[in-house]
Amino acid sequence: MTLTLFKNGNLSAAGHPGDDAVLVEDGLIRAIGNGSELSLQLAGRRAAVVDWDGGHVLPGLTDAHVHLGMHGMKLDMLDFTGMTSKEEMLQAIRERAALTPPGEWILGLNWNENEFRPAAAPHLSELDAVTQQHPVFLTRTCFHAFLGNSEAFRRAGVTASTPDFASGAYGRDSGGGLNGWIYEDAVQPFNEVQPAPDYAALKQAVRRGIADALSLGLTAVHTEDLRLLGSVETMLRIHRELREEGMLFRTHQLLYYAYLQEAEQLGLAAGSGDEWLRLGAVKLFADGAIGGRTALLEQPYSDAPETSGIAIHTQEGLNDIVSAARRLGYPVAVHAIGDAAARMTLAAMQHQPLRPDAALPDRFIHAQVLNRGLVEQMASMRLIADIQPRFVASDFPWVLDRVGPERAGYLYAWKKLLAAGIPCAGGSDAPIEPLSPFLGMHAAVTRCRPGERHEGYLPEERLNPAEALRLFTEGSASAAGEQRERGRIAPGFRADFTVTDRDITADAEEMLNVKVRMTVVNGAVAYSAD
């Protein structure tokens, strides 16, 4: 039996004003109260003591939507986050090329041409002008559109005469030549010719992702890494080994649909695992992203009337995947950004309804372009909205040009979802967005970018600080079926705490300035700023 007394904390934001201590036994919260009184309750029993030193104590924060391994790998790639022009991008590639042996791939990610002035990404010819000795492959911030130079296209075997995919396309100029853009599933030939990381590299990526998450105050994440790791068995082995090596961190693993058969062969069901790793819903995509105009809309894009986006599956295809998941007792987690994708997703979920006794709900991921009818339909179903508040800071104001004013009423409409009684869980979608949960909370509360001072983009959808915090605590716990064990500081709940240097619920700007002092997982200090 392990006893630990955590004392000298401020628990007001966690719903315990006036209390400053928590007694933990074997990873569970046993009592909450005054430190002196809890010390007396120990009645001579030996307990370790951890001093919070006046820090503000929150329930352990959980990011409900990340790609943990890719986040770890991102730390070794060219990162274009924050760049403001294609010239800045090209210079970064030029500098990396000077340090990279000829023939090796140059990989980069997280550019957003909508932030550039002018709003244009590099053309294939401009990438070629930087280097023709290296294949260059760049991933847009949405992870649904890509850029390559001629050497990358050559290695992928893609030419101007290569036909588009049913669920993807190659960008072309007015003469029909390739312009460097690659959309959705058309990326497959490029993925196939890039060198695959070995087991050690994959494990190191996950390790780095976990370490970064802990330093940002996260005690757990919901992640989908199978498209990177390559097998369920590899995923389980990596996390088991990291746990045996002393990493304290919880993961809720979404199962990419292509690995459903392997999970069945391993005898895994939804909810399989333990307090450190559990298997969740079957993940699939209904459409792409608004930035690259691949999110599937009912009506054409306002700024590109020639397209309505890309459907990743037909309605029949979606129905079949959901039915396969249901046969094995799994809920589904469907990426659906556009309103047409939302309609198809809800239809597939209702075609084969979730069993009433299912341990986990379905997950509706992103839910960025909706309408009143779709929200009412969602409210009638057992699902949770898996939302990414930080998208507001990245996508506005240009997203208004994409969808037009007639669709703005239900655009990133988090407040309307909550008002309709739809549970919401908060995530970052890292590495697409920064992993810090406090940046997500700030976006949810202000509907502004950091540094901006205005009433917010579609201000009627702003959340209050308590609602924003619940996205990353109770909301994330509900999405994982753990609402009775995690997400609150209460007796019997798991002893996961995030300790900060200030009260983030007092002022939204504090969410930008906050520093994590300590991250506690299962009653043990997993990260300390000291």
Image (cartoon, helix red, strand yellow):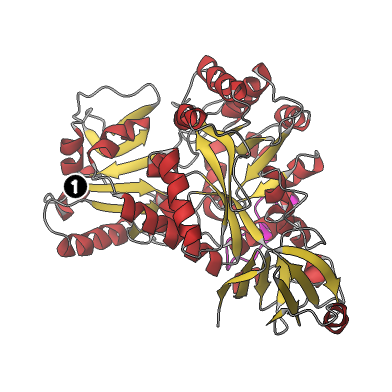
What percent of the width, then of the height, locates residue 375? Answer: 73, 32
Label 1 residue SS: loop
5 sits left or right of 183 in the view: right
Identify which residue, 181 or 346, lies in the foreground: 346
Q: Give the prevailing secondary structure in the magenta stretch.
A: loop
Looking at the picture, tell me which residue is in the foreground, 435 or 114: 435
> How far across and how far down the image is residue 501, in percent?
66, 79
Q: Tell whether 192 sits left or right of 326.
A: left
Q: Position of residue 236 (x, y in %)?
A: 47, 46
Residues in magenta? 446-460
Residue 172, compared with residue 476, is above or below; it is above
How many numbered marks are there? 1
- Residue at 59 percent across and 44 percent down: it is 273
Is residue 120 in view from this perspective? no
Indicate the quadrant where residue 23 lies. Answer: bottom right
- Type of residue at label 1? Pro
Q: Quadrant of the N terminus?
A: bottom right
On screen, residue 465 versus residue 290, left or right, reads right
Furthest residue to the top?
A: 316
Q: Is residue 448 magenta?
A: yes
Check disc 1 and report the residue beneath it.
Answer: 135
Residue 379 part of the magenta-drawn span? no
**Quick check: 513 above or below 108?**
below
